[in-house]
Amino acid sequence: MSDHPPMKGTLPGTATPLQDGELLAAVDLGSNSFHMVVAQSLLGQLRVVDRLRETVRLGEGLDARGSLSREARTRAFDCLSRFGQRIRDIPPHRVRALATNTVRRLAAPQAFLMPAESALGHAIEVVSGREEARLVYLGVAHAQPPAPGKLRLVIDIGGGSTEFIIGSGLDAIERESLQLGSIATTRRFFADGRLDRRRWDEALTEVLAEFQQFAGNYRALGWDDAIGSSGTNKAIGAICAELGLTKGAITAAALPQVRDAMLAARRIEAIDLPGLGSERRPIIAGGLLVLEAAFQALGLERLMTSKAAMREGVLYDMVGRGGADDPRGAAVDALMSRYGIDRDQARRVEATALRLFDQLSGAWGMDHDDRLLLARAARLHEVGLTIAHSQYHIHGAYVVEHSDIAGFSRQQQQFLAALVRTQRRKIPRHAFDALPDRLLPAARHNAALLRLAVLIHRGHEADPVPRLVARADGPRLQITFDRHWLEARPLLRADLEGEPAAMAALGVELHVAVD
C-alpha cells in the first residue's frame, strides 16, 4: 500500500469552480473492474489525459454473509495503490472515488474502506444503485448527446448490478437498479460452469420475474433510442460485429444467435466467441442472460453501445458541483417540497447555523464541504414532522438516510442523518457509528452547531438574533448572546442550561455567556 499522509476528514467533490488547466480524476470501484479517468479542464471542456483499468473481480470474493475473501481484498488494494500513485498530486477535492454494488453488500464496509482509502490516498464514497444509475446516464449523455426533446433508455450491466435509466437531455427521469450483474448472475445460475438450454431458460424465467417491478412503467413511458454502457454490452456488441450479425449494435435478431453460439460450448471455460476477451469469458454468461431478459421484458429491438459509463458521469458531476448544475441543491429542495417543510423556519435555522460555522470553521478545521452539509441538514431538520411530532428527529434521520437523494453518496446521507438525529434531546452513543473516523470531528462539530441553531429558533420567531458570538479553543465552545435579548426568552435560557451536559456526548464543552 502507498504511504500517504492522513486524509482530511471531509467528503470529496467540493463545489468550487474549476480553473483552466486543473486536473480532476474519477475512480470507479466496480464489482468486476476498477477504472480511473484523469481529465483536464480546458476552455470549459474536459479533455481526458489518462485512463487506467484493471480486472479486479471484487464481486467474486463476496460470500453470502457479506464478507470479502482475502484474495479479492489483496487484488483491490494492490490496484488502488497503483491508481493512487497516478493521482498522488491531484488535490483531494478534485478526486472522487465511488464504490458500487459489492461494497454496498458488505456486512462491515468500513473494514474494507479504511485500508482501501489508505491504498488510494483518497476518500472512497459508496453510492446507491439509483445514484449509480444517475451518474451512468450523465456520462453517456455527455459522450453521446441525445436529440433535443427525445427520451433515451440507458442500460448498464456491471459485475454486481444492472442499472436502467430513462432520461432526457442530461437529466435522468427514471432510475432502477437490480441485483443482477455479470458476476453475480453467472455465480447464481452457472456456478458449476455447465451450460445448456434447459438451465438457460429456467434462469431467464427467474430474471424476467425481477424485471416486472419496473418494465411496465418503462414501456409506458417509452424512449426514442437505447444505449448500452459498460463492459458486458461492449463485449456483446463486439461479438455481434465479429460474427457479421451487426456493425457493433446489439439487435433482437442477433442476440439469440450469440446465445446459441455460447451455449454450444457446453461449459463456461470452453466458450470461444470471436471478439470475446479471455478476462470476460468467465462472466459473459450472466451478462448475456441479463441482456436477453432486458430485450424481452422491455421489447427492445436495437441497442447501441457507448464507451462512456459511470466514471465519465462522475467527472461531469464534479464539474456541475462547481457551478449552477449541482444536483444536490435541487434534490434537497425536492425533498423539502415532498415533506412540506416550513421553509421560513428552515431558512432561519440554516442562517444561524452558518453564522456560527463561519466564526468557528478556522478553529475547528472545517471547510466548504462541511458548511454545505450543515446547510442541507438545517434545511431538512424538520423533515420528520410530516410523520409525527413525537420523536420527529428520529423519523427525520430515517427519511434522510434511506431516501433516494440525487447527488449524495451513502456516507453523505449518513452524515446528514446523524445531524438530523442529534439535533434535539439526548444524543445516543451509536449516532455516528455509520461514519468513517475521518468524518467524525466535522460531524460532531456540525451537530453541535445545528443543535444550537434549532434551540435558538425553537419559538419560530421571525426577528433576527441581534448578537451571537462564537469562539472555540479545542473542545471548549463559548457562545455569547445579547443580554437583554436572552433575558426576554426564559424558555431558551432553560434549554441552554441543559445543553452543556448534552453537548458532552459530542466532545464539546459548551459555555454560555451574555454581553
Image: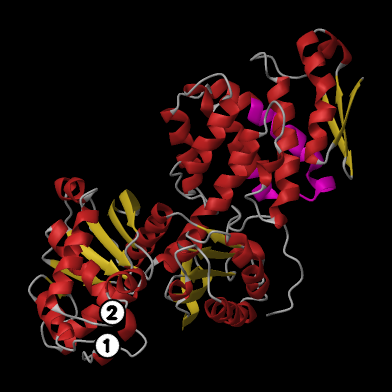
Percent x, y for residue 502? 79, 30
Answer whether residue 380 is visible to the viewer in this image: no
Please rate how many residues cluster around mark 1, counting C-alpha atoms within 10 Å: few if below 14, some from 14 to 19, many from 20.
Answer: some
Residue designated by label 1: 276
Which x, y percent locates residue 95? 59, 66
Mark whose residue sits in front, 1 or 2: 2
Using the image, determine if residue 186 lies above or below residue 15: below
Q: Which residue is mark 2?
A: 284
Q: Residue at x 24, y 58 (%)?
A: 153
- Percent across and percent down for residue 510 are 86, 31
Whether residue 452 appears in magenta in the rendering, the answer is no
Q: Residue lying furthest left in this view?
A: 253
Crowding near the residue tagged with mark 2, few <14, some 14–19, many ≥20 C-alpha atoms within 10 Å = many
**Which region is colored magenta?**
349-372
- In the picture, which quadrant includes the C terminus? top right
Amino acid type for the residue under numbered disc 1 = Leu
Tell me the element at label 1.
Answer: loop
